[in-house]
Amino acid sequence: MSPGCFQVRSSGLLTCRQTSVYPSPYANCPPKYVRSTLNAVPTTHSLLKKSKLPFALVIQPYAALHDSEDPVPVVPDQVISRCRRCRSYINPFVTFLDHGHRWRCNMCNLTNDVPQAFDWDTALQKPADRSLRPDLNHAVVEFVAPQEYMVRPPQPLVYLFLIDVSYASVTNGLLATTARCIKESLDRIPNADRRTRLGFIAVDSSLHYFSIPRDGSENSEPRMLVISDLDEPFLPIPGDLLVTLSECRENIEVFLDKLQEMFQNTQSNSCAMGSALRAGYKLISPVGGKMTVLSSSLPNIGHGSLTMREDKKVLGTSKESSLLQTANSFYKSFAVECSKAQVSVDMFLFSSQYQDVASLSNLPRYTGGQTYFYPGWNAARPEDAIKFAREFSDYLSSEIGLEAVLRVRATTGLRMNTFYGNFFNRSSDLCAFPAFPRDQAYVVEVAIDETVTKPVVCLQTAVLHTTCNGERRIRVLTLALPTTQNLADVYASADQQAVATYFSHKAVERALGSGLEPAREALQAKAVELLSTYRKELAGGSVSGGGLQFPANLRGLPVLFLAMIKNLGLRKSAQIPTDMRSAALCLLSTLPLPLLMQYIYPKMYSLHDMPDTAGLPDEQTGEIVLPPPINLSSERIVPYGLYLIDDGQTQFLWVGRDAVPQLIEDVFGLPDKSQLRVGKQNLPDVENEFNQRVRAVLEKSRDHRSKGVGSISVPHLYVVKEDGEPGLRLWAQTMLVEDRADQSVSLVQWMGSLREKV
C-alpha cells in the first residue's frame, strides 16, 4: 500500500484519495451508509480465506426517518448514465476519455458513450458544467427515475390497520390508545401527493370491516360489516374499505373516536389474525402497501392459528431452540405471497401472555417489515401509553419507500454471495422490499471469485424505490476501497464493529437453523480462530509469554463476541421467555450498526461524578455533552454512586446502596432514599442544575439522530436500587457483560479460556 494514496478517516478507516474524477470531499461513501468489514481488500480468494476474516458490507441506505433530517443530493434531470455491460451507475470513480465524450466503467472497464443531455441544464435550457453534477461529486445520490424504471405507475402510500379487538386488547387499553394515536398522527402520515389511503379491519372471532364515507356526504357515519367465515374471508364491498385520507379526513376522525368505545363490552377471547391478514391481503394486493398489525393475543382461530406451545421445562435445554422456529408454515408461505404483491407487514405485539413472536415475526422478516414487541404493556401505566404513542406516531410519519429492490454491484472479480436482513431474496443478487424501512440495516457478504488486479475496488449499492410522494427514484451509494496482497494490511484495516455486525446476523441465522448452543459455540470458535491466525501468521508464531495478540483496531472484538453470547437473544439461561428471546433475535438481525453495537455492549455512564461539562451544550456544536463511557463491570460501580446503563432499548438508572441524601434530593426531589420507588418511571423535573444535567444526559443518550440512524425506539427508564427489588437489580446486572452471571463467564474467564485454546 503506497502511503501517498491514503488518509485515515475519523473512524480509523482508510479512504482512497486521488482516484475520483473530480477532487470532491464527498466522493467516497460515508460510513454511516456503508461500512466494510475490511478496508483493504485482499486481491485473491486464497488471501481472504487465509485471514479467516469475513468480507461483507453493512448497508444502511437511510440515516433518518425523514429526508429533511438527512438530505442527499438529487439528480432531477432523469439523465441516468449506466454501464452497458454491468449496469453500474455513473459515479465519482469513473474516468472520461475521448475529450469527455465517453466514460470508462470503474467496475468492469467497458467504455460507454456519455448521454447527449448529460451536459445540458434542462431547467435553464443552456449548457451545464459537468464538474458540478452531483453524481460525479457525491458517493451518495438519488436519481429521479424515468418511465423505464417502472413496472406500473407509482403506487400511492397505503396503510391497512389490522387491530385486535378481543378482550385482552380492549382491557389493556390497546384499542383505545391505537385509535387515539392514529387520529392524532393523521397530519404526520406522508401525504404530499394527496393519494395516501387508509383502511381498518377489527379482529376478534370475526372480521369487522369499516366503510368510511367521503367528507361532505349526507351520512358521515362509518358502517361496520361483519364477516364470520374465517376460512374464505371475502370482501363485502371492495370499494369503500380503503379510503383516501385527503377526501375522508373528517370522517376518519369520527370513525377513530367511535372505534375507541366500539368493543368495550366484548367478552371474546378469540383472535382470527391469520384470516384477517388473508382478508387484508385481498383488499390491498391490487395496489400494494403496508399491513400494520396491532395485537395483544395469540392468533388462535382461523388461518395460521397458533397454540400456547411454550413449556417452561424446556427453557435452557437443547429443546428450547424448537420454540424459536415457526409453529405454522402459514407465516412463511403467506409472507412470500405478500412480497410478490408488494405487501409489507409490520407487527406491533403487546401480549402479557405467550404470543408466539417466533412465528409472527416471519411476516415482517420476508416483507421488509419489522416486529415491535411491548411485553406486558398496559395503557393504565402512563409510561407504557406514552412510549407506544411516541413510537407509533414516529412510525406513521416515517417516509418509507415502496415497491423497492436493492442490488449491490462491484468491481470485476467480486460477487455478492449472501444477503442478511428483512426482505425476500428474489434472485441470486436481487433483494425485494414491498416497503423499504428507514430504521434497519442489511449485511451482504462478498466473495472474491477471481484475482483483482486493480489498486482500488468499488462496491455500489442501488435501491430502486417509489417515494411515499409517488416519485420513482434510485438511491445509489458508491464505496471505493484500496486492495492489498498483504495479510497484515487486511488485519490492520478490519473494522471490528462491522465484523461484529456480520457475526450477529450469522449467529441469528444459526440460532434459528441449528439452535442456540451451536450459535454460541460458533462465535467462540471464530474468536479462537481469528486469534490463532493472527498469532501464527503475523505475530511470529508461538511467542513465549503466551498473551493474546490482536492489532489495536480489533482489540474490542473478543469483548463484543462475549457480549453477543451473553445477549438476551443468545445467552444460555432457563429464565428467558421465548417471546423475549425471539424479539431480541429480531433486533440482532435488523438494528443499524450504531444501535446494534449499543444493544450488544451497552453504554454505561457515571453520573454522580460526571465532568462539569457533561449534561450541558458543547460551546462549538451546541450538542449536549455525554460523560465518558465506562466499562460494563461491577468493579466500576461504587456503592455511593449514580449510573446510567443504556442499551438503546432500555435505560437503567442505578442508585448505589450508600447514595447520600443530597444526591437523592437533587436528582429525584425526595428527602431520602427509602421514599424512592423503583421500576418504570420518568425522572421528575426538579429545579436544580444537577437534575437538569442528569435529565439532559438521559435524553441525549436516547438521541438517535446524533448516532446517524433512523429509529422510532423510545427506551423506558427503570430506576434500580442496588439494595432494592432483586428481580429488577438482576435484570440491570445482565447489562454488565464483563461480569460473571447466571450460566455465563466473566470477561477475565473468557479471555483465559481463549488464551488456553489459542
Image: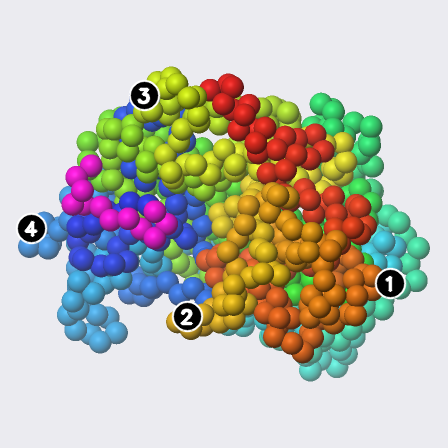
Compare marks 4 and 2 and give the one earlier in the sequence: 4
Which type of secondary structure does the marked residue at label 1 adopt? loop
Which residue lies under the disc numbered 2? Answer: 621
How far apart marks 2 and 1 lie (CA) works out to 51 Å
Question: Is any part of residue 248 visible from this angle?
Answer: no
Which type of secondary structure does the marked residue at label 3 adopt? loop
Horizontal placement of 519 versus 98: left or right? Answer: right
Q: Nearer the viewer, residue 376 or 653?
A: 653
Compare marks 2 and 1 and give the one earlier in the sequence: 1
Residue 707 image point, x, y percent = 48, 57
Q: Quadrant of the N terminus?
A: top left
Q: Are marks 2 and 1 in contact (CB under 8 Å)?
A: no
Which residue lies under the disc numbered 3? Answer: 540
Q: Answer few, some or many: residues within 10 Å of disc 2's Cα (few below 14, many 20 plus, some between 14 and 19).
A: few
Which residue lies under the disc numbered 1? Answer: 263
Instruction: Find residue 98 and name its label.
Output: 4
Which portion, as a residue range, is magenta? 1-12
Q: Nearer the viewer, residue 726 or 192?
A: 726
How far apart marks 4 and 2 lie (CA) works out to 47 Å
- Of marks 4 and 2, the one in the foreground: 2
